[in-house]
Amino acid sequence: MDTKRTAPLLHIADKIMRECVIDPSRLGVIFVLSVLGKSPVREDYDGFSISASFQKQNDLDDYIAAIRKFGFFVQTFVDERDFFSWVQTGGYDELSPKYKFVYTSAVNGIGPGRRALVPAYCAHMGISTLNQNAYSATVGRHKHHVSHLLDKLGVVAGTPGRLILGAFCSF
């Protein structure tokens, strides 16, 4: 772990946690999620729908209830476009919590970059996110590129087939 880079982040995280324990209303979590039966499916694969990876409404309700139980603010969007419009019309800036974070698992669309839309938009608008950035969201889903990057870094990852077979056989 690079302590020069993580120390300031840990200090900031510690500061936020201390403030929010004293006054939970200072923290807001904004969910941008694809929810089964609520989120529109604009593009889809033949034979296997992207909606299979959507959140179930009762799971979302549990997340929200748990976060609100601690006194934190929660705002939810079940469509990326609604979130983008809300930000563009000043909704994000009007929120009262001092610390606001976006969490997304929205996957509406097809292709390798489909999970990068919200993180890229948030980075462009200066909005903090709780999960991966746009680059990580894209490259992490493309096994060939990850394997190539690991090879360039000298990390021996093997081929996917070899990794799977390696669990059952010794080479």
Image (tube, rainbow, N blue to C red):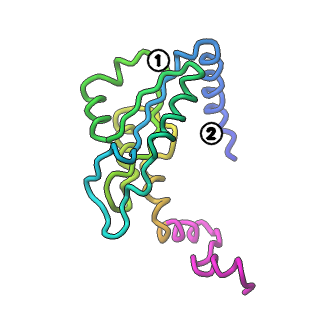
What is the secondary structure assignment of the residue under circle 2? helix
The stretch drawn in magenta includes residue 155: yes
Question: Residue 103 placed where, x, y %?
Answer: 47, 38
Please give the name of the residue rendered at 49% of the width and 34% of the height, measured from the top-left corner. Answer: 61
Q: In the depicted view, which residue is nearer to us: 35 or 148?
A: 35
Can you tell which mark lies on residue 97?
A: 1
Question: Residue 82 placed where, x, y %?
Answer: 28, 36
Q: In the depicted view, which residue is nearer to us: 38 or 161?
A: 38
Work out which residue is located at the far top of the displayed protein and give it: 22
Please give the name of the residue rendered at 52% of the width and 65% of the height, measured from the top-left corner. Answer: 146
Label 1 packing within 10 angstroms: few (<14), some (14-19), many (20+): some
The residue indicated by pointer 2 is: 5
Query: Which stretch appears magenta?
Result: 146-171
Work out which residue is located at the far bottom of the displayed protein and give it: 171
Question: Residue 20 placed where, x, y %?
Answer: 60, 18
Please give the name of the residue rendered at 63% of the width and 77% of the height, measured from the top-left corner. Answer: 164
Q: In the depicted view, which residue is nearer to us: 6 or 117?
A: 117
Query: Between tags 2 and 1, which lies in front?
Result: 1
Work out which residue is located at the far right of the displayed protein and give it: 170
Amino acid type at circle 2 is: Arg
Question: Residue 26 placed where, x, y %?
Answer: 52, 16
Q: Is residue 162 above or below residue 78?
A: below
Q: Is residue 112 above or below residue 11?
A: below
Label 2 packing within 10 angstroms: few (<14), some (14-19), many (20+): few
Q: Can you say which quadrant of the picture contains the C terminus?
A: bottom right
